[in-house]
Image (tube, rainbow, N blue to C red):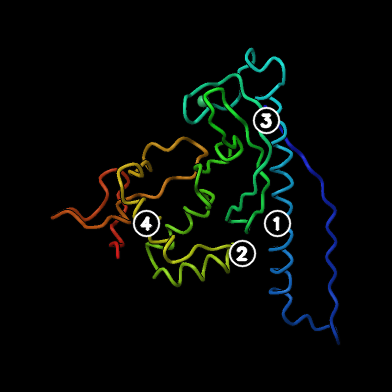
Amino acid sequence: MPKAESTWEVRVGLAAKDFYLGGWESALTGVRDQILPAFTGESVAVFEEQLIRAGCPGRDASQVTAPFRCQRCGATTGFRRRGRRSRQLRTRLGRLELQVAMVGCRCGHRFAPLLAALGVEPHARCAPGLARRALELCTELPYRKVAQTLQREAGATLSERSLRRLVRRAATSRWRCGAATAPAGAPPPICSWSVRPSVGAGRRWCRRCAAPPRRRLR
Ligand SMILES: [Zn+2]
């Protein structure tokens, strides 16, 4: 099993007049918002190096099966390193500024294996955990408040337009309810019924997970 470790020494100091720590929560939240993205980016980079090394071994590239596959032709061998590309990713840990390693396939396709390993779709700017949290909030709150809540909770947010797009996608068939069949340990998917554009006549809950319909698309 690939394992990536990185160690950080973090020192946090508290100082106050008259021993009164007014505003300590917001001060430490600011520290968290700075530290977590940097820490996460570093850990992910260590993991990525192992991933790329396993899939692009150099001369023997055609003999070694990579732990990832080409998203265009499905090949699992013959990859070569093709530099790095800046990538910004909004996550529940804040906004990550990544320099993702690109690999080239023999079919000519270039892609970043790290993104697939993180469960991020090729052109998505949002990590799956943040998308899931956004969808949960979208079933309860207006988009503007969802954007504000995400910023406060995660230190990263999505625009109202992006939230609307996310909800529309969640309501399509590829996001069908998998709550009843989600593998153990995986975060349960958001039931598309709760973000469904319209509710069928006579039906008031999802047939698979019994989630109530809570939001209509705007
Ligand atoms: Zn390919």
Disc 4 residue type (three-letter): Val
Disc 3 residue type (three-letter): Arg
Q: Position of residue 51 (x, y in %)?
A: 67, 31
> CA separation, marks 1 and 3?
28 Å
> CA separation, marks 3 and 2?
33 Å
Which badge, 1 or 2, is on the more N-terminal residue? 1
Location of the N terminus (image quadrant): top right
Q: Residue furthest left?
A: 201
Vertical placement of 78 versus 10: above or below? above
Which is closer to the viewer, label 1 or label 3? 3
User: Are there few (<14), some (14-19), or many (20+) residues within 10 Å of tag 1?
Assistant: some
Q: Secondary structure at mark 2?
A: loop
> CA separation, marks 4 and 1?
27 Å
Along the line of sight, the residue nearer the viewer: 121 or 209: 121
In the rendered image, which residue does mark 2 sit on?
Answer: 155
Label annotation for residue 36? 1
Along the line of sight, the residue nearer the viewer: 80 or 161: 80
Which badge, 3 or 2, is on the more N-terminal residue? 3
Looking at the image, residue 46 sits to the left or right of residue 70; the answer is right
Which badge, 4 or 1, is on the more N-terminal residue? 1
Label annotation for residue 81? 3
Q: Residue furthest front?
A: 108
Q: Secondary structure at mark 1?
A: helix
Q: Are marks 4 and 1 in contact (CB under 8 Å)?
A: no
Q: Position of residue 145 (x, y in %)?
A: 45, 72
Disc 1 residue type (three-letter): Leu
Along the line of sight, the residue nearer the viewer: 176 or 21: 176
Q: Position of residue 68 (x, y in %)?
A: 57, 27
Location of the C terminus (image quadrant): bottom left
Disc 2 residue type (three-letter): Gly
